[in-house]
Amino acid sequence: MNKTKEKIFNAAIEVFSKKGFYKATMDEIAEKAAVAKGTLYYHFKSKDDILDFLITEGLSLLKNEILEKISAFGNAIEKLREVIVIQSNFLFKYRDFVIILLSQLWGKEDRQNYFRENLYEYLRIIEDIIDEGIREKLIVECDKKIISSAFFGIISSILIFQFRNGEKFDPEYIADNIIKYTFNGIHYGK
Amino acid sequence: MNKTKEKIFNAAIEVFSKKGFYKATMDEIAEKAAVAKGTLYYHFKSKDDILDFLITEGLSLLKNEILEKISAFGNAIEKLREVIVIQSNFLFKYRDFVIILLSQLWGKEDRQNYFRENLYEYLRIIEDIIDEGIREKLIVECDKKIISSAFFGIISSILIFQFRNGEKFDPEYIADNIIKYTFNGIHYGK
Amino acid sequence: MNKTKEKIFNAAIEVFSKKGFYKATMDEIAEKAAVAKGTLYYHFKSKDDILDFLITEGLSLLKNEILEKISAFGNAIEKLREVIVIQSNFLFKYRDFVIILLSQLWGKEDRQNYFRENLYEYLRIIEDIIDEGIREKLIVECDKKIISSAFFGIISSILIFQFRNGEKFDPEYIADNIIKYTFNGIHYGK
Amino acid sequence: MNKTKEKIFNAAIEVFSKKGFYKATMDEIAEKAAVAKGTLYYHFKSKDDILDFLITEGLSLLKNEILEKISAFGNAIEKLREVIVIQSNFLFKYRDFVIILLSQLWGKEDRQNYFRENLYEYLRIIEDIIDEGIREKLIVECDKKIISSAFFGIISSILIFQFRNGEKFDPEYIADNIIKYTFNGIHYGK
DNA sequence: TATGAATGAGGGTTCATTCAT
DNA sequence: TATGAATGAACCCTCATTCAT
């Protein structure tokens, strides 16, 4: 990604997350990127194309971070714990991206189907860990598709929590709580 | 809600969920509702107003159902179990509404802030149950804001699961799995 | 065609012929028609659609006039003479339309293929008359496709002549000359 | 014309005739010419300038061919016959150029006025031949401006014929037919 | 209550042209 | 001579909203 394209990329994240994809205007992106509007179209085919690029890059970042870091951990429990930590930190660091993702994930447009397909690749990584855990008798028998979806749901949870609590947001504290919830459940004495 | 307004209401849910709020047009809503475009403006102030009305009604429906049904249950564990069941069935029945809600929840527009405020009322209901459970020593000590958010995250989870699995969706089966996960965690032997 | 659509129709003829289709702007058409720009799109699907409508209407007018008037004439010679007279007068009266037609007739876009197909219907009318004339031994054996094309070429001739001569244009004088040329040729003493 | 300029020239003819002047883009011309876009502007002042150059060159070619070849013929009749033959062959050989010319001839832009002025020089050549023929009593008394315009109209005719007939186009056959028509008319027994 | 023709601000996109290299 | 990234004016089209009937 060259200098200009990167400026546009960053401006787009900022504007899309502030205004939402539809209310965001190419004019504003150009202004924020400090380039002419035509320059956007020299580097991207369309407004949609910017969004595609941005979602793909963002999910790539998350997937790669997960894949890199979990390999250092010995068993499925430790890996899933790390996934939660990474998700929490990722949301803290790339909040704007997550907002864009969650806004775009639910539609029936081709673009949005494609986003979900992309997300499923992420879920498959989690499924694999769950599978491993079940085989190692570290994780209870469960529907791995449902549980991996739940791991995604955690992202939504955290974002909602963050919206509600505003500044008082500590990713490690969040992660700790979610980990306890996820591994032991909330039922006392079980 | 009189007959015409209801036709518009239903048409709006259909169109908003199919196209998303921004791609939906008043023309299409009018066509689906089989009324003239001007009629929309007789019953609603604006396009935004239709959405507001729709979200408010939908969340009301969910809150009321929860409030009604949980009163029949004796303790917090049973109540939360019921919350999960209701959420799963609600998503099954009002999928289009849930899609609209999840698409609109993340922005920074006034309208969207207002939607979240509305949602927080729902979360407070769950918090209260958690509180009750903690006092009754049925639920472990935990950050109730985080856990109530997690209960909301479950909705996202289920919707993602449903998108992925398509037709094969059994709300009771989902609820069972989520309940086990929520109460006992996934850690084997704990 | 209702009042508003007709205003747009007339404005479009004026603007297209003055500026050419591509240099013409919807803004200018709207201004000349004294309606808002959006109104153009209420009555026509697109700029292309206005052009289509306009060409179709114009060629219809010409075809209908030809078909109506020639039926009054007894033989092919008289009919073709009338065709030339009508063409000359038509060009005099609907000069702007003819300019638009001749500008658009030569391209390879779908729209332009469609225009030519439409024109061919006109040529077929002339072919039929030529056929009739050949059968009646009033017209020499000839390739009727070439000769009917030549009848169309006359329109270009006349328009070129008119461009060159400016104001001094008498459609009857032109028609007389073309008729002599067409029926007797220019070879002296033949 | 050096190598690069010639590549651009040929690319421009191809693109202008395929897309029409307005739909043609400098990008596409550059691509077809296999040079960078900036290079176009090194050799031509503007897109208009390419068109001007191209029309001027094309009409020059036609005029020169006419002037060269007709001098070999003894009288006006033979010269005009040759004009028709040349026109027919020219259209066969430089069809793309003719399409561009006929698309551009009818507008009121300065450039287009200039094209017509250029064309009139061609018509004057024909007028001179007609004049000569009238003086020699080989051609009937007629309005030479109208008849020379008709000679231009023949070009339009032939192109229309060619569009209609597609592959089955024989320039000599066409020329023969047009010659008979032009000299003897189509009236049987005259 | 209901209609639908008319509005016009706003936004995505195109593309000829420029200019530093 | 040649390049191609960058520019920005221009333009088509959309669509929420209005209002006379």
Image (tube, coloured by chain):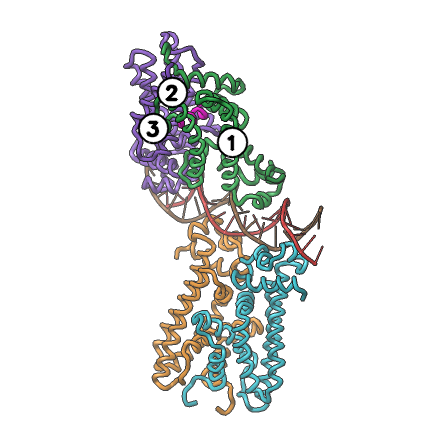
Chain colours: A green, B purple, C orange, D cyan, E brown, F red
**Residue for point 48% across, 66% down:** C105
Q: Secondary structure at mark 2?
A: loop
For marks 1 and 3, give the CA distance: 32 Å
Crowding at dot 3, Cα within 10 Å, few <14 / some 14-19 / many 20+, comes out as many
Tag 1 residue? A64
Q: Position of residue C170 (x, y in %)?
A: 51, 76
Question: Circle 3 sits on which residue?
Answer: B91
In percent of width and height, residue E20 lies at 71, 46
**What's the chain of the residue with tag 3?**
B
Numbered mark located on residue A137 in the image: 2
In the rendered structure, the answer to whether residue A91 lies left or right of residue A134 reads right
- Residue at position x 39%, y 28% in the image: B55
Which residue is drawn at the image coordinates 34% and 76% (left, top)?
C71
* Tag 3: amino acid: Leu
- Counting residues from the start of the chain, the first of labels 2 and 1 encountered is 1
Judge by depth and name the residue closer to the eye, D143 or C92.
D143
Look at the image and say whether residue B57 sits in the magenta stretch: no
